[in-house]
Amino acid sequence: MMKKVAIYLFFLIFSGHLFAQEPNSEVKEIKKVFIDNLLSKMTLQEKAGQLRLISVGGDLTLDKVLDKIEAGEIGGIFNTVVEPDLSQMQERALKSRNKIPLFFGFDIIHGHRTIFPINLGIASTWDRSAIAKAAEVSADEATSDGLNITWAPMVDITRDPRWGRVSEGFGEDPYLTSEAGRIFVEKMQKQSLADKKSLVTSVKHFALYGAVEAGREYNSTDMSERKMFQEYLVPYKAAIDAGSRAVMVSLVSVNGIPATGNHWLLTEVLRNQWHFDGVVVSDHGAIRELINHGVASDPKDAVRVAIKAGIDISMNDEYFLQFLPELVEEGAITEDEINQACRHVLELKYDMGLFSDPNRNLDPKLDIDTMFADNRLHREEARDVARRSIVLLKNENEILPLAKNKKIAVIGPLADSKRDILGSWSGAGRANLAVTPLEGIKNAVKNPESISYAFGANLSDDKNLYRFLNLYGETTKFDNRPADKMIAEAMKIAKKADIVIAFVGEAEGMAHESSSRTELSLQATQKQLIKAMKKTGKPLVIVLMNGRPLTLSEEYAQADAMLETWFLGTEGGNAIADVLFGDYNPSGKLPMSFPYNVGQIPVYYSHLNTGRPRGTENMGKYTTSYFDSPNEPLFPFGFGLSYTNFAMDFSLSSTKMNRDGEIIVTVNVENTGNREGMQTVQLYLQDVTASVSRPVKELIGFDNITLKPHTKGQVKFVIKYDMLKFWNNKMQYVAEPGKFNVYIGSDSTTQDKQTFTLLD
Ligand code: BGC
């Protein structure tokens, strides 16, 4: 009997498996004993080592890193996807005094080897199953490739398209972003961290990175606590509630205090209020940046500020190891503080099952190149998510979809670019395997000879921009031919064709970390190209490839049809062809408003009303307005057309609701057109009168329905009491009795409204 118990305990201790699933008190105790025991044997130096995340590169050659690992100076590795190297590193970790295994991290933002659309594109699907597919395939490939932790999902709310990283997030809305973040966490981490296919998530960037002033990278943020808790913090909380075991801290300051040194944010909110018990990781080099921020006097002081605020692991920083032991000896921090951080790391490793199987993701037999090249299923899934991400912005005279027997001129600097279509943060993707739009179009038609192509124009004639984009190796092609020659060539081809498709937008490097812009229009070279195409008199389809909302009034007027395709990933070209030829009826909806001009920014649908809402009389004078621009965006949040049309009406189950009651919203949807299509039904709410001003509308639900031509269907939503809660005038999270407007529509401008009253 004793033997059986011992075997059972051994299994529990070393499997880690049961802990992540259903940790009962006995199981928790066993884990605690294991970690207490380990901690009691570790030196201060070794504990500091566990708090370091290091990448191989620069002065830190693999050999140096291996020695440091064996000396117990490194807890985790990031940014390496060479599996034999990872295996070697793990081997050396197991030779260290305490034999604590490493974990291996990488930025798996929108796919790993098979690249999916950028996250703004994934959000455009408004389709939970598509979001799930992207997350699942990413985790599957990453964990087969030696990795077990990632720095994703990025759920920063973004309302300023000048910021390049809007491409990495899920847009402007807390609910849509929370849903996407939750799904990423659930599908990447899975039920149990000990599952070999589980990829630990680090929700980022906590917090408010997306709210940087003027959209300028790494800038400050300043925001009322109400707005934070009501909107910007919501998605991080959703990801943590879904179980994200790590959090990455943002590089910016939050109300005057850098997030990396912000005790209120990292300890009072994250740990005490939200009960987060995972690992808090600083962003790249963020500890030393505390000196530049002006809250630490020198490197040692920066380490003190960070650890005191609640950072557990430092990313790519030399100072934790150098100064943590010294700070304890001097009494500036306590050993308990280091133990606490170290415990978080060891618990995570324990729950991942690394102590029982350090090589859980390392399979030297697996040849990743073969896996990637042969992975038809993943590519099919990527193609499906990609076509669902495409947003049809205009389709005059139903010019789309195109017949497959037309002569098509494919024009533009992005039409045949394999690197750009992958988008940023696709480091482990293979550009040579990506399908460009030109290739996708040729794949789709019966006679590829009917497709002609011209580069047409450089993305820009600004040489500085190219220097910026190609700083670390040439990714964006610059054609040295004179501009008029290239345009003339494109015109010649266009004139011979039945239709022109122009691929314009941004290079992938323009929508990345450190790529803020002040102008959001297409560059002059691209504008000239479009003007020339227009001049040919041929029908013009503009296909946009970009990582942020652009200002597109001019192109909108010129185009007969317009598609927003973001950066769609490995299968992008095929997905674009699917939509152009109607093999897929576009269903994407914008997750961010597209402004008319930069001066309107921030422009987002869920703004507050003012005392003087925009009026239409007397040119809007003395009401909230600009005299030179509309208030509204060119394309609103939630907007996207289809090749068919949908009619909708809806009813509420009651006009009154009790605290313990609910309202059922029944939406009748009819496909009134001649093609099968999918509609995303969007549910918005407005709390009409409350103790604080509430937004004119907030998204609280969405669902998809696919209907055959001339058929009807129903979508139902349930509005519950908790969904009416907000942070009131005393910063309590409550629902206040009174009138609520419910809106149903196909985008955020819907005026289709019903009303109910929440009773006291
Ligand atoms: C970015 C993070 C990323 C990290 C590691 C930083 O520069 O801000 O989002 O996870 O690098 O690559």
Image (cartoon, grey):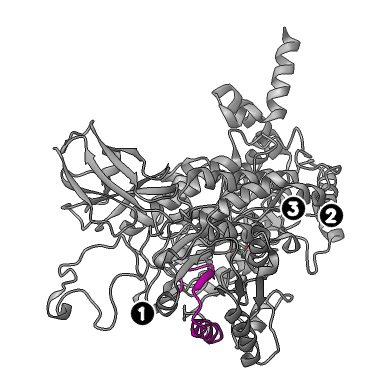
Residue 118's mark? Answer: none
Q: Which residues are magenta?
A: 524-550
Q: Which residue is mark 1?
A: 599
Q: CA distance from mark 2 to mark 1?
A: 52 Å
Q: CA distance from mark 3 to mark 2?
A: 9 Å
**Residue type highlighted by circle 2:** Leu
User: SS of the residue at dot 1?
Assistant: helix
Camera-side residue of 597 and 192: 597
Q: CA distance from mark 3 to mark 1?
A: 47 Å
Q: Residues within 10 Å of mark 2 (few under 14, many from 20)?
A: many
Give the x, y percent position of residue 80.
76, 56
Q: Residue at x 59, y 75 (%)?
A: 497
Relative side of 756 to 295, left or right: left
Residue 74's mark? Answer: 3
**Contact (CB < 8 A) between labels 3 and 1?**
no
Give the x, y percent position of residue 567.
58, 64
Camera-side residue of 584 and 450: 450
Quadrant for the C terminus, please: top left
Front tag of 2 and 1: 1
Total labels: the figure holds 3
Quadrant in the picture for residue 395: bottom left
Q: Is residue 194 magenta?
A: no
Q: Residues within 10 Å of mark 1 (few under 14, many from 20)?
A: few
On screen, residue 604 above or below 728 = below
Quadrant in the picture for residue 457: bottom right
On screen, residue 499 above or below 441 = below
**Residue type highlighted by circle 1:** Gly
